[in-house]
Amino acid sequence: MIATSLPLLAPTVKRAIGLVAMFLAFQGGWFACVLGAAHGAPWAGTAAAAGVAALSIGLGGRPAADAWLVAAAIATGFVWDSAMARGGLIAYAEPGVLSVPVWILALWALFAVTLREPLRALHTRLPLAALLGAVGGPLSYAAAARMGACELIEPVWTPLVLAVGWGTITPLLLMLARRLDRGRAIPAAVR
């Protein structure tokens, strides 16, 4: 009885192990970026996050979809975090030559590789995705601020703006992930 049920469990167990590994890699990359920026070595975290994202794209079943999603998330993050910095709501450690530091863009790449497969359950639960973004986004920035990677300039307004922004951005990126899963948003020449 047990021997015949093991093949049925194997794909489920394999997927669970993959999701746990992705979660741990994401967390490791996040800490590397934040602590690297906080301690004057933003390149170390950026390299770690880029490695995790590249590995995820390479090992994933849809590398073109994942690469498009990473590019879209980085572009979104550049616009969003630039607006936050220029609006005087956030000051980043190790800002670099751009209005937003490269380590922040690496965090956006990390977030993107979780959108298609690990967060697949949210593809059709967009109100829940908005709620999770509205809570998780500000908490992530607050944790980074506590570690010294950024400063939330306006203690009341910054978390509120982050909540609205992440509550909007998260479901939008998940909708793109769902479209990419179906192959609709990838140009035919790239597929």
Image (tube, grey):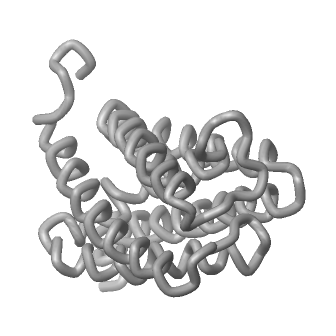
Q: Percent position (x, y) of residue 80?
A: 42, 53
147 or 23, nearer to the observer: 147
Q: Is residue 153 above or below residue 87?
A: below
Q: Percent position (x, y) of residue 162?
A: 43, 72
Task: Name which residue lies at 50% across and 47% down.
Answer: 109
Name the quadrant of the C terminus.
Answer: top left
Task: Name which residue lies at 56% across and 56% down.
Answer: 85
Q: In this view, does 61 lie above or below 170?
A: above
Please state the total of marks drawn on the protein image. 0
User: Is 7 left or right of 35, judged from the image as shown?
Assistant: left
158 or 36, nearer to the observer: 158
Image quarter for residue 64?
Answer: top left
Name the quadrant of the N terminus.
Answer: bottom left
User: Is 175 left or right of 58, judged from the image as shown?
Assistant: left
Q: Percent position (x, y) of residue 140?
A: 56, 74
Task: Name which residue lies at 69% across and 58% down.
Answer: 92
Q: In this view, does 77 lie above or below 117?
A: above
Q: Percent position (x, y) of residue 117?
A: 33, 57
User: Is 38 left or right of 57, judged from the image as shown?
Assistant: right
Image quarter for residue 10?
Answer: bottom left
Task: Name which residue lies at 55% across and 38% down.
Answer: 54
